[in-house]
Amino acid sequence: MAPKKTPKGKSGFFGVRQKPSGNWGVEFSDAGRRWWISTYPSAHEAARAYDVAVWRAVRPRSHLNFPEIESRVVAEMLVPQGINMKEIRTTKKKKMKKPSVVVSAGETDEEAMARFAREHPEYVQAELEYYWKREAEQKKKGPKKEDEAGPSTVIPIESSSEEDWADFSEEEEEEGCDDPTKEELCEQFRSSDEE
């Protein structure tokens, strides 16, 4: 099957079209793949670059913009800056819309979900695989940062006899105000406690 010939556009050349900037862009198709070549200041230069791509793809001479050129070497000499072919990815993954779960009258949520699972097992399988994959990744990473820190620091109490606790509680009750500026406030609290 012969490759499809690119139609001549407004530029009058195969594979050449004017960009909004005023420069001329070159695209080339071969074996179901599209290639972006580059932009050039004139349509003539862009057409020469397209011809180099045709020569490289070993296409028929009828696909050339300048069929009078005798060889690929001559065609490449006429494009001093050369060509840089980058493939244009046109195949985008189409996202399939997940069907919604419709709960019929008199049907419980559990029954509706079970029916959905029977009708669309691929979604159930995809969900299971997602959670398996996520669990495997979490196992590889190890414990979370919070877990790595270990238990909170506990300060051991050397002596915990009842006498020590008794001394502590007595000190609190007898404790007075050390700050002379707060003495008045302390007296007010003491007097209010006495009343």
Image (cartoon, helix red, strand yellow):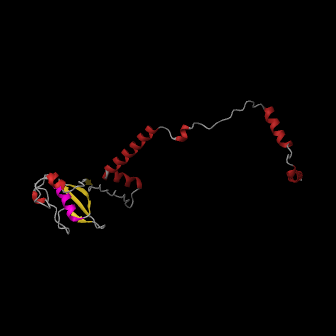
Residue drawn at (18%, 59%) of the image: 48
User: Relative to 179, is 132 on the left or the right?
Assistant: left
Q: Does the stretch in magenta take in 118? A: no
Magenta stretch in the rendered image: 42-54
Main SS, magenta region, reads helix
Q: Does the stretch in magenta take in 47? A: yes
Between residue 59 and residue 132, name the one nearer to us. Answer: 59
User: Relative to 7, is 132 on the left or the right?
Assistant: right
Percent coordinates x, y for residue 145 in the rendering: 53, 41
Give above or below for 65 relative to 150.
Answer: below
Percent coordinates x, y for residue 116 in the rendering: 34, 53
Residue drawn at (21%, 61%) of the image: 45
Q: Quadrant of the N terminus?
A: bottom left
Give above or below for 128 relative to 188.
Answer: above
Count of numbered labels shown in the rendering: 0
Asked whether residue 50 is in view, the answer is: yes
Percent coordinates x, y for residue 191 in the rendering: 89, 52
User: Relative to 183, is 56 on the left or the right?
Assistant: left
Residue drawn at (79%, 32%) of the image: 162
Between residue 69 and residue 138, name the one nearer to us. Answer: 69
Which residue in the rendered view is the most extreme toward the bottom?
10
Percent coordinates x, y for residue 134 in the rendering: 41, 44
Between residue 180 and residue 6, name the one nearer to us. Answer: 6
Asked whether residue 53 is in view, the answer is: no
User: Relative to 105, is 176 on the left or the right?
Assistant: right
